[in-house]
Image (cartoon, rainbow, N blue to C red):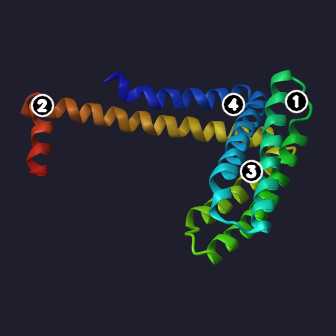
Amino acid sequence: MISAYLIPILTVILGIVMLAIAEKVFIILVIVLGAFLILSGSTSLFQLMKLSTDKNYRINLLVRSALSILLGALCIILSVNGTLDKAVSIMLVILGIYAVLAAGSEVVTVIKLKEEGIPVRKYITEIAGTVIAAVILFLLASPYGENIVKFCGIVVILIGAILAIAAWRNVSADKENEKAYGEGTVIAEVKQIED
């Protein structure tokens, strides 16, 4: 029963943290983005490199992957050293510019992969996600960035409250079913439906 409320409680706590220390959320965001960039660059380098033997494709992929790993390492190193406090906005803009350039580079990669008959749907989704991430990064780097984080904190708290209400209703419904039909009846009904 307590486990039903765990996700809602953690969600509300995350929202409160976003409200209380929005400026620190930027630093955490930059560290997470740095880790994502390193992972993304490494994945692209090792998985996509073997998909085509075209020289331009390989150079494009190598440059994009190397930049991704380098920017990711820079994000993490500067954040861990504590030198990023005043440069968060600059780093977010740089990451946003990188995201736009990476999306453009990914378009070239998708075109080449499509020419070679390789399915590209997941790469198109990645391009859309990268463009959305760039827009978010530019918004966060704006003077309203801290307010955006606080607004997101309020939204997260509301989502946590909705999840808590849903969990409470589910727990209440389970208790009523146990009273009416006995313990384990719901499981027996599910098994009958499956058969």
Q: Residue at x 71, y 66 (%)?
A: 109
| Precedes in sequence: disc 4 or disc 2 | 4
Rendered view: 129 above or below 53:
above
Disc 4 versus disc 1: distance between alpha carbons? 20 Å
Residue 19 is tagged as 4
What residue would you read off at disc 2?
184
Tell me the mark number nearer the camera, choosing from 4 and 2. Answer: 2
**Residue 144 seen from this side:** no
Percent coordinates x, y for residue 175 in the rendering: 20, 29
Quarter holding residue 173 = top left
| Precedes in sequence: disc 4 or disc 1 | 4
Query: Residue type at mark 2?
Result: Gly
What residue would you read off at disc 3?
136
Residue furthest to the front = 53
Query: Residue type at mark 3?
Result: Ile
Residue 122 is tagged as none
Q: Secondary structure at mark 2?
A: loop
Q: Secondary structure at mark 1?
A: loop
| Precedes in sequence: disc 4 or disc 3 | 4
Quarter holding residue 33 = top right
Tell me the mark number nearer the camera, choosing from 3 and 1. Answer: 1
Q: Residue at x 77, y 40 (%)?
A: 147
Left or right, residue 160 beside residue 154: left
